[in-house]
Image (tube, grey):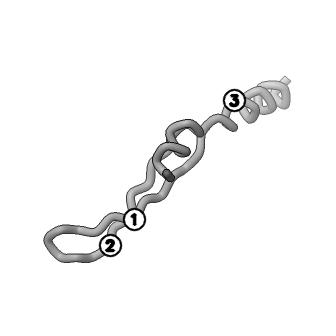
Amino acid sequence: MAKKVVATLQTKSKDWTKVIRMERSPKTGAYTFKESVVTLEEAKTLLK
């Protein structure tokens, strides 16, 4: 029974992806990395 629950959770997690963006700090000029988990549609618009 536990295998069925794990299998159903894995199929629903395919609609999400992790996006890592690099941003520059206005004060120091150093680069920082922002991580977020978004849907595939939002990821496509962020990468354009």
Q: Nearer the viewer, mark 3 or mark 1?
A: 1
Pick whichever of labels 3 and 2 is earlier in the sequence: 3
Pick whichever of labels 1 and 2 is earlier in the sequence: 1
The quarter of the picture where residue 26 lies is bottom left
Residue found farthest to the front: 48
**Badge 2: few (under 14), some or many (20 or more) residues near its Cα, within 10 Å?**
few
Q: Is residue 5 left or right of residue 42?
A: right
Which residue is under mark 1?
A: 22
Q: Is residue 35 left or right of residue 17?
A: left
Q: Is residue 46 left or right of residue 11?
A: left
Task: Out of 46 and 7, give the one closest to the viewer.
Answer: 46
Pick whichever of labels 3 and 1 is earlier in the sequence: 3
Q: Is residue 14 left or right of residue 7?
A: left
The kind of secondary structure element at disc 2 is strand
Work out which quarter of the rendered image holds the N terminus and state it. top right
Which residue is under mark 2?
A: 31
Give above or below for 46 relative to 20.
above
Query: Residue type at mark 3?
Result: Lys
The kind of secondary structure element at disc 1 is strand
Q: Are marks 1 and 2 in contact (CB under 8 Å)?
A: yes
Which residue is under mark 3?
A: 12
Q: Where residue 44 sits in the image (x, y, percent)?
A: 55, 45
Q: Where residue 39 sits in the image (x, y, percent)?
A: 55, 36
Give above or below for 8 relative to 21.
above
Query: Residue type at mark 2?
Result: Tyr
As measured in the structure, the alpha-carbon distance from the residue carrying label 3 to the one carrying label 1 is 28 Å
As measured in the structure, the alpha-carbon distance from the residue carrying label 3 to the one carrying label 2 is 34 Å
Query: Residue type at mark 1?
Result: Met
